[in-house]
Amino acid sequence: MQDRVTFSENTGIAQEVLVFSDFITSGYDDVDDVLRPIYEEASEVLGQEFPYPGDE
């Protein structure tokens, strides 16, 4: 909270607008939904197996 006060004072941005987004306050996002397809596509495109961490 003190960082928010200091930032507000230094920038002139009202503290009321310095709030966390719904995404941040919801906790976390499952990165598996993002990363797994990248590993699968890289394996397919490059013709080499890139195992997803934890699946080996």
Image: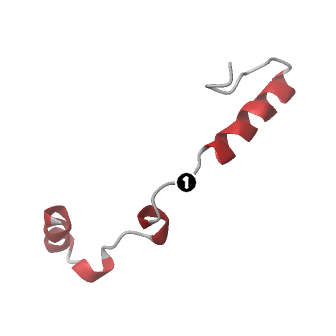
Q: Crowding at label 1, few (<14), some or many (≥20) Cα neighbours within 10 Å?
A: few
In which quadrant of the rendered view does residue 35 lie?
top right
The amino acid type of the residue labelled 1 equals Asp
Q: Residue at x 77, y 29 (%)?
A: 42
Specify the quadrant that holds the N terminus.
bottom left
Residue 20 x, y percent position in the rendering: 37, 69
Q: Which residue is mark 1?
A: 29
In which quadrant of the rendered view does residue 44 lie?
top right
> Is 18 located above or below residue 43 in the figure?
below
* SS at badge 1: loop
Q: What is the basis of the colouring in this image?
A: secondary structure
Residue 8 x, y percent position in the rendering: 19, 73
Specify the quadrant that holds the C terminus.
top right
> Is 34 located above or below residue 2 in the figure?
above
Foreground pick, 46 / 12: 46
- Left or right: residue 38 versus residue 19 is right
Residue 22 x, y percent position in the rendering: 47, 71
Q: Residue at x 45, y 59 (%)?
A: 27
Label total for image: 1
Looking at the image, can residue 14 be seen? no
Q: Residue at x 68, y 24 (%)?
A: 55
In which quadrant of the rendered view does residue 41 lie?
top right
Looking at the image, can residue 35 be seen? yes
Q: Residue at x 81, y 17 (%)?
A: 48
